[in-house]
Amino acid sequence: MASATPASRRSQPVASLNAQARIPEGVLFKELAGETVLLNLNTGVYFGLDPVGSRIWQLIQDSRPLHQILTILLDEFEVDQTRCETDLIQLVSSLCEHGLLEPVASPRS
């Protein structure tokens, strides 16, 4: 359901690896030289992602929960698990707060 509510009030930050996020309507993205530019057409908010952030964005497009994304990132990049988990949750939470992603409701609430 689309809403004109400001992004900061519409989306709650992602709190755990059990969460999942999706790309809301009105958000465009373009990959350029390994980086991704995101634009929310409803709010004018835009964001740039580095290559790791771009990989996370690709995995979110595949409708994967964050714990699966974490596992894939740990296989593909040389990174400490704790740091990767923290950075993943912070990035997804920030994108949700800016209306560039939205949390997927858990079927068991």
Image (cartoon, helix red, strand yellow):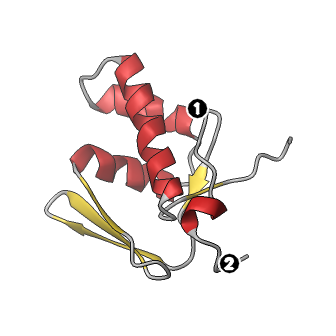
Residue at the (65%, 34%) spot, across then down: 18
Q: Residue furthest left?
A: 33
Report the number of discs: 2
Residue 66 shown left or right of residue 50 in the figure: right
Residue at the (52%, 55%) spot, across then down: 97
Give the percent coordinates (x, y) of residue 92.
47, 47
Q: Nearer the viewer, residue 87 or 98?
A: 98
Give the percent coordinates (x, y) of residue 66.
54, 38
Q: Which residue is mark 1?
A: 17
Give the percent coordinates (x, y) of residue 108.
86, 41
* Residue type marked 2: Ser
Residue 105 shown left or right of residue 30 in the figure: right
- Sequence-first disc among 1 and 2: 2
Residue 88 shown left or right of residue 66 in the figure: left
Question: Residue 8, labelled with which disc?
Answer: none
Question: Residue 3, labelled with which disc?
Answer: 2
| C-alpha gap between disc 1 and disc 2 | 26 Å
CB-based contact (under 8 Å), mark 1 and mark 2: no
Q: Secondary structure at mark 2?
A: loop
Residue 106 shown left or right of residue 104 in the figure: right
Check the image and report above or below for 39 versus 94. Answer: below
Q: Nearer the viewer, residue 22 or 97?
A: 97
* Residue type marked 1: Leu
Give the percent coordinates (x, y) of residue 50.
22, 50
Residue at the (68%, 54%) spot, across then down: 104
